Image (cartoon, rainbow, N blue to C red):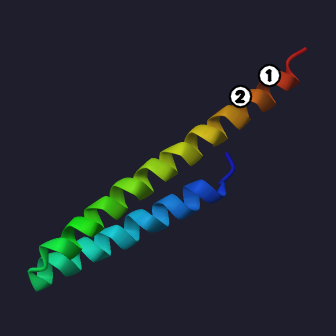
Amino acid sequence: MGINKDQVEGRAKEAAGKVQEAAGKATGNLGTEVKGLGKQATGAAQAKYGDAKETIKEHNRDANKRP
């Protein structure tokens, strides 16, 4: 299975969102915490999109190998 740009960027956004959420909790800044949660959701969606693209690519590759 390959890795594409959306998978990498999505998971990076998720991680950054977790850090931002934790920083918001630690400082008591609800706005930062919420922004972190939003970034996590956006990153998760982008990563899932990348996963779906890879699955489709694999199925197409397998379909082309069949006689």
In the foreground, 19 or 28: 28
Callout 1: helix, strand or loop?
Answer: helix
Q: Quadrant of the N terminus?
A: top right
Q: Residues within 10 Å of mark 1 (few under 14, many from 20)?
A: few
Q: Residue at x 36, y 63 (%)?
A: 39
Tell me if residue 61 comes above or below residue 30 in the rendering: above
Is 4 left or right of 23, judged from the image as shown? right
Check residue 59 in the rendering and tell me which mark sits there, or answer none.
2
In the picture as drawn, the residue positioned furthest to the top comes out as 67
The residue identified by callout 1 is: 63
Secondary structure of residue under mark 2: helix
Whole-percent x, y for residue 17 in the image: 34, 68
Q: Quadrant of residue 7?
A: bottom right
Instruction: Say which amino acid is labelled 2.
Output: His
Q: Residue at x 49, y 45 (%)?
A: 48
- Pick out the residue farthest to the right: 67
- Seen from the viewer's position, the closer of residues 61 and 25 is 25
Horizontally, residue 15 falls left or right of residue 54, namely left
Three-letter residue code for mark 1: Ala
Q: Horizontal and vertical percent for residue 57?
A: 72, 36
Residue most extreme to the left: 28
| Marks 1 and 2 in Cβ contact (< 8 Å) | yes
